[in-house]
Each structure stands twice: as structure tokens, then as C-alpha cells.
Image (spheres, rainbow, N blue to C red):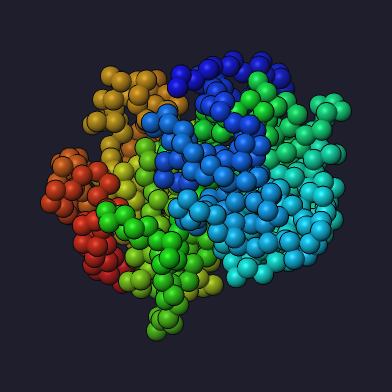
Amino acid sequence: MRPLIFALMFLTPGLLHAAESLIDSSSPLETIGTEFGLADGPSWDGSGSLYVPDVKGGKLFRYWPNQKKMTVVLKDAGRISATYFNNGRLYLSDNGNAGIARLNGKEKIGILSFDGEKPKNAPRPNDLVVDHHGGIYVTLTREGQVAYISPAGKKTLAVKQCVSPNGIAISPDEKTLYVAAYRPKEIWAYDIVEPGKTARGRVLATMDDGPALGADGMTVDRAGNVYCAGATDVWIWSPSGKLLHKIACPTRPINCAFGDGDMQSLYITGFGGLYRQRMKITGRSPNPPTTKELASKNANRPSTLIPSEINASLDVEYARYGDRRLLMDVFKPTKPAPALRRCIVVVHGGGWLKGDKTKFRALAVELAKRGYVTAAIEYRLGGEALFPAGIYDCNAAVRYLRANAKSLGIDPDNIGAVGGSAGGHLVGLMATGHDVSGLQGDGGNPNVSSKLQAAIVMAGPMEMITGSVADRSRNQPKVSNSNKWLGKTIDEAPDLYRLADAHVHISEGDSPILFMVGEHDKPERNAPSRKKLKSHGIFSDVNIYKDGKHGCWNRHPWFKEMAGDMDAFFREQLR
């Protein structure tokens, strides 16, 4: 179908700067589909499609953006008011049947029924959100409560009293629960004491757009900004409650969720159907499946299963810049070690503009199984903050790990890093720019060193002022990722590119670097850096993998071999 395009309404002058940092103004709001009785709570499945319930039509739709195709998953879905995909499973707020369900193929499977509590007047679940443990928070609007269903199926009350709770969302670090109070049009924030238990709430923000009712469905982006559908607009607030922007919609919005492969599209459901607004900032990807039951059956992809011998601490804050909290996932062997463990920072790729820490989950777990403490980190992407923000974050992660080495059980003198593609460039820059003040930032622990003891660069560029990155910046400026990440071309800001150039910063005392690359992924890419490292007496080598293409480190049959080579290198270099 051909999308219908709506121009965004003009921006309120006081919100212009904030809006420019969030909204992709080059892509107006577009209508994706109108074949709904009333489209409600959407959810991205992390692998190519968006689920959209039709609460009035009694159907469950699935939209595939790459094919621009809309299909019906369940023709007789009943009154589903919201969906939420996490941990490899789609959860349904089965409002019509007074329960919570999950989707199994094309079948609804009940998780919990509220019928037994008040048979004649059972609570009707409205909106829901699922934490990384698999626990479900759900609003019970008529009862003025928020219920929590534990992964074991036990129901408790997370919020006992709230006026007409409707939309619900959880902060990226899972420390705050957000609830939209529909009638007073207030956004409430509750501190999460433990899964399913909250402290007394506070009003974060209020919609002040007149008498029309409407604090409805909610979501958050990776920076923790809070989005809520109102009477005419989707409102966006910072984590501290500052209004950042309002997205005007052609019909009344009902709910919203991030989606698409880069998680940079905000999908909005409403009375007119399904809309999409491209954003500069990305949303939160679903947490990958962690259990054997839900682990991917894709033979080409390594499993994200977290085995019992590995302890996972997800969404750990490692740095903070005002409202922005940077998070890492820490994986640690449960078996006691005779000595402090070596630590590996895992840095994802994505052209500096997309991707997140979950994309290298399998690698982080695999290295933890081999005895390391691993930390898969997020960092600010180019749409959220230009360079040097991303490298500030990477170095802050090392400082955090070193400063907290005792509690984490790691050796502060044996910290390495591995990254792929753009993540490889960042790791290379961490390895050679540890003594460059302009790359450190103020993300915490300022008196702690960010120096690595060993680094692995997988198919990432070391050079920025020369080589392919510089050539693309000049010759293909509109498609150059570096131009978008640094905000300028190399000829406009040569000193900025020089600061981002890992090759330039190579000097005596840098950490050893192993380069890993597929046979068909330009193995010659970092030959100048290998030569320069060796000229300074620093160990450097390259491993080339037969038939490997870009990204082979995250695919079979290369995954195990490359993990084994990483293990061998780190054991040699991290003593």
C-alpha cells in the first residue's frame, strides 16, 4: 500500500532545540494502515515485524515494514487492548477475557485469569509492560491499581491506588515504573524497590492541553525519555519531567512503541489506524530470549541462552550525564574462582548510528562461560549525541569496572575489550586513545584509568583521516556514517576526525591489539595500524577467517572458532 504523508505541525518555539534532537524532521509522519476498528497497544518483535491489536475488530495484526505487508495473525483474537514483546515471547492484555495471555504460533495461551477474583465483575487488564525477568506489570483501570504477575505466575499489587491507570512503561534501568492516569492526565513515576514492589509514587508530568481526557498508552526510548499518547498528540518528557516535544497526530492517538530494524521508528496507534514517525533517537530493543524453551532456533545464529552456570546482571548503570543513564549487562561465572577474574568489555557495532548491547549478547555469554566477567555495554549513538559522546561512554565503562573491581570480583589490572565493525573502531580508539584527555569525558570515576590491557578489533576501521572512511566522507557525504556521527565532513572538521582516529593515537605503551576479520571483509583494512603498532614494540596480529563476511563473529560456523581465538589471545595478554 502507498503511505499517506502528513506534515508535522509547527514546533513550539521553546521546544525547538529538544525536538531537533529527537525527531527526524526529514521524514514526516506517515500513515501505515487504516484497516482497523481501533488500533491499540503495538509491540516490535525484535526480528522484523510489529504486532498491532485491533481492540474493536477483535483481530491481531502483524506488520512487516520491509515488505510493507500487513497480515492477520488471529482473526478471532477477542478484545486485546495491548501487546508487549520481550524475552522471546509476545504477551497479550486479554481485556475481553479478563486475563493475561501469550501468543504461541496462532494460539492464545492463558497466563493468568482475573475471573476468579470477582466472577461477576472481574478486573479487565488494560495496558502492560514486561521486565527483563519476565514479570508483567498491568494496569487495572477500573480498580485504580497496577498488578504484577511474577515469572512463576504469582499475582501481587505493585500499585494499590492510582486514579484511572491506563498506559504503563518501565525505565531502561528498570528502577522506575511509569503509569499514565487517564482522567487527570498525569504521568506518575514509582520507584521499583524490587520486581513487583514499588515505593510511593510522584507526579512526573501533567498534560495541560485543555479539558479533553487522554493520558493513554506509553513507551520509553533508550535515553529513558517518556512518551505518552494524549488527546491529540504524543507527548515526550525527559526522565526528570521536562517537556521535550509533542508529536501532532491526524487522529486521536491511543498508544505507541518503537520499532523497525534500527529501532528508530515510533509507531503510533490511534482512531485513524497505524502511523509511523522516524526519530533520531532509538527505542529499546526487546530483551533476547534467555531460556532454552525460547532460545532462537535459527541455525545460523548463536544462542542467547543464559545457562545456570552464568549469573546475569542486566541493565546496570555505569555512567550518568544529567538524566541520561548508561547501562551495561554483566555476565559472571557462578562457580567461585581461586583468583580475581579477567574482565572483557563487549562493544556492539552498527555504524555508530544503530545497534545496542543485546546484539552481542551471545558473545558476552560465551566468553563468560570461558571464565571471564564480561560487560556488554550500550553507548550513545549518533542520533542521540555526536562524537565524542560514544567514546566517552566506552571509556567510562572501563573506569566503572576498574573502580568497582572488588565487588565484581575482577582484576582491575586485567581488563580487555572486543568490538565489531563500528564497535571495533571504538575498541581500537579505547586501546590507543587512553591517554588522550579529549576522549575521556565526565561519565564518572574521573581519577580511575581507562587503559585497556588487551583489545580485539573485528573488522572496524582504525583510520579516520585517511582510508575508506575519509574517502566516503568526501565522495559520498550524504550516505557517510562518519559525517552523521561526527556531524561534519572531514574537510569541514579535520581536527575532529583526527581526534576520532585510532591509528593517529598509536604510541608506545598502548595495549596489544588482535585484529579479526572475515576472508571477504577487507583483511588488508588495518595493515598500516599493525605495522605502526609493531614499530612501537606493541604486539599486533591478524586472524583471517575462511569464507567469512562482515559480521561473521555473530554467525555460525565462525562464532565458536572466533570465541576460542579471543579466549586464547586474552589468556595470553591478560595475566
* Residue 409 horizontal/vertical position (percent): 47, 74
Image position of 12 with respect to 76: above or below:
above
> Which of 433 and 197 lies nearest the eye of the viewer?
197
* Residue 391 horizontal/vertical position (percent): 44, 44
Identify the residue at horizontal 62%, vertical 18% (top origin).
8
> Which of 340 and 170 lies nearest the eye of the viewer?
170
Image quadrant where one finds the N terminus: top left
Identify the residue at horizontal 73%, vertical 61% (top origin).
115
Quadrant hosting residue 295: bottom left
Image position of 473 with respect to 50: above or below:
above
Q: Horizontally, is 475 left or right of 524 in the view?
A: right
Residue 532 visible in image: no
Identify the residue at horizontal 34%, vertical 65% (top origin).
366
Image position of 152 with respect to 138: above or below:
below
Residue 552 visible in image: yes
Q: Horizontally, is 294 left or right of 129 in the view?
A: left
* Residue 567 horizontal/vertical position (percent): 27, 66
Identify the residue at horizontal 35%, vertical 61% (top origin).
303
Quadrant hosting residue 244: top right
* Residue 97 horizontal/vertical position (percent): 68, 53
Image quadrant where one finds the C terminus: bottom left
Quadrant hosting residue 239: top right
Q: Please state the total of marks drawn on the protein image.
A: 0
